[in-house]
Amino acid sequence: MAAAHVLIVEAPYYAEIAAGMLRGAARVLDAAGATYEVVQVAGAFELPGAVRLALKAMARAGGPRWDGFIALGCVVRGETDHYDHICTQAARGIMDLTVQFAVPVAFGVLTVHDTAQAQARARDDEMNKGAEAARAVLAQVALARRWGV
């Protein structure tokens, strides 16, 4: 069976955090023999829209092909309700894409109270949430292939 080809959509608003999560995802994908591409968007709110644009591009004749998608980003709680709205809509947008289009999309968006929590989840260790998202998307790709989706 061909190696998975994954599109990583990264929101580098917190550049150091995003870079750590991207390293974790790349480590897992490389170990699995998967290939991947990385695109960047402004922030977590734009992640579902970028995945949807990729799906539309795939629908075109001769368009690119990806077996799955990883959304990476970080939202840190601030003093306003903005955090709640962004987190809810980013998560909802990714879930809607996954369900509506039956496509493997891993949600690698940190929703944390402070940057220390984010840094702990972006380190190069077993707690890296980018690596976790990569494992999740590879599992979903395997399931989709098993069922011929």
Image (cartoon, rainbow, N blue to C red):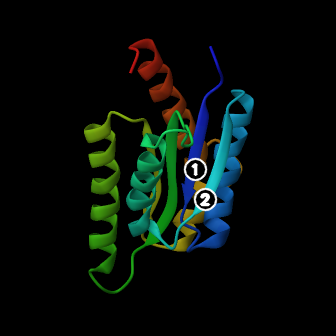
**At numbered mark 1, what does the secondary structure look like: helix, strand or loop?**
strand
Q: Are marks 2 and 1 in contact (CB under 8 Å)?
A: yes
60 vs 14: above or below: above
**At numbered mark 2, what does the secondary structure look like: helix, strand or loop?**
strand
- Asked if one can make out residue 127 in the rendered structure from this viewpoint, the answer is no
Q: Amino acid at mark 2?
A: Val
Most distant residue in the front direction: 61
Query: Residue 105 in the image: x percent, y percent?
Result: 43, 42
Q: Is residue 132 left or right of residue 96?
A: right
120 vs 67: above or below: below
Q: Please name the residue shown 47% across and 59% down the image.
A: 110
**Mark 2, other Cα within 10 Å: few <14 / some 14–19 / many ≥20:** few
Q: Please name the residue shown 62% across and 13% down the image.
A: 1
Query: Residue 41 in the image: x percent, y percent?
Result: 53, 68
Numbered circle sitting on residue 82: none
**Count of numbered circles in the view:** 2
Numbered circle sitting on residue 8: 1
Q: Please name the residue shown 27% across and 47% down the image.
A: 96
Query: Residue 122 in the image: x percent, y percent?
Result: 62, 57
**Mark 1, other Cα within 10 Å: few <14 / some 14–19 / many ≥20:** many
Q: Give the mark, 2 or 1, whose residue is nearer the N terminus.
A: 1
Quadrant that contains the C terminus: top left
Q: Is residue 121 left or right of residue 3?
A: left
Q: Please name the residue shown 42% across and 71% down the image.
A: 113
Residue in front for this viewpoint, 118 or 53: 53
Query: Residue 82 in the image: x percent, y percent?
Result: 31, 79
Numbered circle sitting on residue 39: 2
Residue in front for this viewpoint, 43 or 97: 97
Rounded to the nearest angstrom, the CA distance separating label 2 from label 1 is 6 Å
143 vs 87: above or below: above
